[in-house]
Amino acid sequence: MIRYLFLCSLLLLFAEPCPAQAWQKTEGKISTPWAEQVNSTSPLPEYPRPQMVRKNWLNLNGLWSYSILPLSGKAPSAYEGKILVPFAIESSLSGVGKSVGKENRLWYHREVSLPPSFKNKNVLLHFGAVDWQCDVYVNEKKVGDHQGGYDPFTINITSILNRASQFTLTVGVWDPSDEGPQPRGKQVKEPHSIWYTPVTGIWQTVWLEAVPASYIESLKITPDVDAQTISVSAIYQNQKPGDQLRVTALDGMSQAGEEVSETASAKIKIQNPKLWSPAHPFLYDLKVTLLRKGKVVDEVESYFAMRKVSMEKDQHGRQRMALNNEFLFQFGPLDQGWWPDGLYTAPTDEALRFDIEKTKEMGFNLIRKHVKVEPARWYYHCDRLGMLVWQDMPSGDLGNAWDSSPGVIGRATDRDRTPESESIYKNEWKAILQANYNSPCIVVWVPFNEGWGQFKTEEITRWTMDYDPSRLVNCASGGNFSAAGHIIDLHNYPIPAMPDPQLYGAKQIIVLGEYGGLGLPIEGHTWQSKNNWGYQSFKNPDELFQKYSSFIDQLKNFIDLGLSAAIYTQTTDVEIETNGLMTYDRKIIKMPIDKLRQVNEKIYSDNSKIQLKK
């Protein structure tokens, strides 16, 4: 299948990395088993965008020059050292391990040689993610800029290259972390409690792509399980009158459907569709072609899944979360997505898969990606492995007041953000939705968490629902309960609890968005040697498992009352938090995985009792 074709083959054949001996990770903290597998000449060499694959590309990950200079300064004429891209400068895998701060700018620089296959092509420069604001220069001329630490962006650098096969690439980055209003998740200048080390600069793959003068810029893929169709729309660059769009759906080597359209969109009938679910994560291949007078101008390869997410009433009149028109209790861990050696960036693609694979083996069917957005390959692995995802918007501009009046559960005031802060949030949230719209694993969008910077709740929620009616929207996980959105979400530590089904169940889906947080620090596998933290701490795995198992029994009772999903905190330890199912270095799973799976699978045993009204 196409998504496997370029993962390990077309690597850095024409790049000019610095010698491997110029880099070594900084010491002083724990690291994962994959840290030793990082190759400084080609870190994270896999194709970075599995849902839109072209053959002609060049990975720019590797050793770049770097400097940290005062914010007001220009790009340096000489650089102070080497940094391993795409690892943030604060991480040990960057080889630097330095802080930057809002008073300074981080500069990157490297030389690039284009392969012969790029000759007479348009050259696109892609960044997976850069935190937070960056300016990009080619041959010392500015070619673009970007704000947003969690969304990919692309710059067409063809005109400035002027057919040259060599050029210099310079990137300047400014990131105020928690001293600015921008989305930043759990990054803070002074890490403590549930707040972690800042991440500054490039933290996802940088790459070049060669495309024709007229090319497909993006795709939007929408399945309709009830109508048994898949809709595909494309955005072109330099389209000409008479151009056609050909969309071909493939079931293995067999064609599942095809349409040639005079417009930029097509709808294909899928006969007897194979539905995607955690139990059967079937993916169709997709080929999208731009035709001109019957000849191929540009072509990309992708994939899709036939799956439906909806809110449906059960036999008791309670709203339920449905997958493919059937009730499925959604159950999984809160996943922070942090690494002791790479911070925001997994050391290798194998490491990126590991957390998902182990979560699946533990008997979970869901991951809540918590106030962070992952690289495209993470969602691809969830698509392929059959893992449901709730996707949070990274929080920022915190400071909401919390209402602790009697009888009020999880009630925060909407924050009065500045126009600049509102605009930053809205632009990045839209970009995140656009970038990840095609991932079938994502079933719920979560605009706000616990009132962290929450503002104009109903406006943001309704906009999100209008932008993507194919998914559910959890307006405020553990925060401002509102009639907006599909879901009412309670956080309760450590024991499970649920919102009152008599108050909410007839209008919105009831979920437990966070609970648990059971801690077990394991000597030699913690971020710091003492003062580690969990909502409730235990001394050994047996005690931990007994408490965890008792929570499962409570959850089973809640399902009959109307609970549709639950999120356990959390996948791994993170810095001083030791409430993970795994240690931060991923070297120890704290409870036997077979016992975890057996007890977790009890959650789904009575799902068939919940009948949805047709």
Image (cartoon, grey):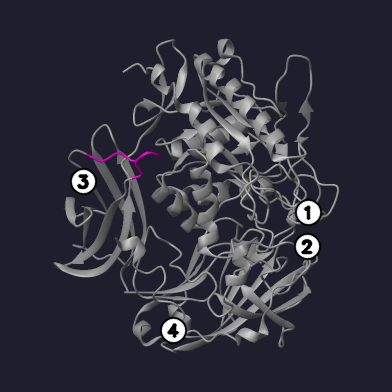
Amino acid type, label 2: Lys
Q: Is residue 222 above or below residue 349?
A: above
Q: Is residue 239 left or right of residue 398?
A: left
**Tag in front: 1 or 4:** 4
Q: Earlier in the sequence, mark 2 or mark 4?
A: 4
Q: Is residue 175 left or right of residue 378?
A: right
Q: What quarter of the picture does the N terminus occupy?
A: bottom left
User: How far is mark 3 from mark 4, CA to CA?
Assistant: 39 Å
Q: What residue is shown with label 1?
A: 179
Q: Are discs 1 and 2 less than 8 Å apart at CB?
A: yes
**Mark 2: few/some/many CA within 10 Å (<14, 14-19, 20+):** some
Q: Are discs 3 and 4 less than 8 Å apart at CB?
A: no
**Tag in front: 3 or 2:** 3
**Tag in front: 3 or 4:** 4
Amino acid type, label 1: Glu
Q: Quadrant of residue 145?
A: bottom right
Q: Earlier in the sequence, mark 3 or mark 2?
A: 2
Secondary structure found at label 1 = helix
**Mark 3: few/some/many CA within 10 Å (<14, 14-19, 20+):** some
Secondary structure found at label 4 = loop
Q: What residue is shown with label 3?
A: 268
Q: Earlier in the sequence, mark 3 or mark 4?
A: 4
User: How far is mark 3 from mark 2, CA to CA?
Assistant: 50 Å
User: How far is mark 1 from mark 2, CA to CA?
Assistant: 7 Å
Look at the image and say whether residue 274 sits in the magenta stretch: yes
Q: Are discs 3 and 2 less than 8 Å apart at CB?
A: no
Furthest residue in direction left, as rendered: 294
Furthest residue in direction right, as rendered: 531
Q: What residue is shown with label 4?
A: 13
Q: Earlier in the sequence, mark 1 or mark 2?
A: 2
